[in-house]
Image: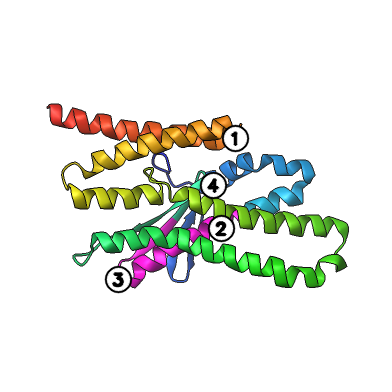
Amino acid sequence: MFGTVQETPYDLQFSLLGIPVRISIWFWVAGTILGFSALKAGLPFLLAWLLVLLVSILVHELGHALTARWFGYSPSILLYHFGGLAFYQPRQNHSRARSILISLAGPGAGFILWGLTELFYRFVLPRFYFDLAPNFQQLASFIVIQMLFINLIWGLVNLLPVLPLDGGRICQEICMAISPFRGLLYAAWVGLIVGGLTAAWFFRQQETYPGFLFAMLAFSNFSIIQQYRNQFRR
């Protein structure tokens, strides 16, 4: 989400559904930091958290990538830090509508995974849950709860109009359609205001990590505004 990610010998690279995927070593480091509290319940819970994080973010990025490929663009996926990116090269038939659909496809894929997890939780898990050992019951509950939370709550948060989140990119496309020369500036102002208010709300709820995250996002949008102003002062 922030800055470039250099390739390292420890990165995991493979192809999924014909789409090149690279998982940076920093994805695992950041994921471990983010889910470190799970280690209090035991190492299997931290490993389960990393698996849930991997599956959820990979499905999200596959939503972007598969939609881009459906439009005829060649995609690739990178997982890094606290998130991921789906890259694609637009062609002459690219449009704002297609860009918005590609942006929406990521959260949409996550919402589908959330729905499937909810069905599993309601109709499948109860059939064998009480046959599991107590430790496995706790682990199964942990996995399901984290899957539901990440794919619903993170998906909704990702739709906030704050660059570079998907909601911010959608906002940028709409602003660019209204004003091609100042659209990015308008989107950055929206991102600065919404990001700042969201950071303040999280801090008020004593949610430190998302508070700092949105504070950084707000500052990133402020930097875009400053760059825009400096460009036109020359």
Is 44 drawn above or below residue 222 in the view shown?
A: below
Neighbourhood count class around disc 3 (C-alpha, 10 Å): few under 14, some 14–19, many 20 upward: some
Distance of mark 1 from mark 4, alpha carbons?
Answer: 21 Å
Report the front residue among 23 and 112: 112
Residue 61, position in %: x, y? Answer: 46, 59
Q: Main secondary structure of the magenta part?
A: helix
Three-letter amino acid code at the position of disc 3:
Gly
Going from N to C along the chain, the mark reached first, 1 or 4, is 4
Residue visible at 47% across and 56% down in the picture: 22
Please give left or right for residue 170 compared with residue 150 in the image: left
The magenta span reads: 51-77
What distance separates the C-alpha of mark 3 from that of mark 2?
25 Å
Q: Which residue position holds label 1?
A: 207
Q: Residues within 10 Å of mark 1 (few under 14, many from 20)?
A: few
Q: Quadrant of residue 193?
A: top left
Is the N terminus in the top left, top right, bottom left or bottom right quadrant? Answer: top left
Foreground residue among 84 and 198: 198
Residue matched to label 3: 72
Of the residues under marks 3 and 2, which one precedes in the sequence? 2
- Pinpoint residue 6: horizontal percent, then vertical percent: 42, 44
**Residue at image mark 2:** 56
Left or right: residue 127 versus residue 53 is right
Q: Counting residues from the N terminus, which is met first, the one under dot 4 or under dot 3?
A: 4
The residue carrying mark 4 is 27
Count of marks overlaid on the render: 4
State which tag comes first along the sequence, 2 or 4. Answer: 4
Residue 111 in view here: yes
Regarding mark 2 in the picture, which secondary structure is present there? helix
Q: Earlier in the sequence, mark 1 or mark 3?
A: 3
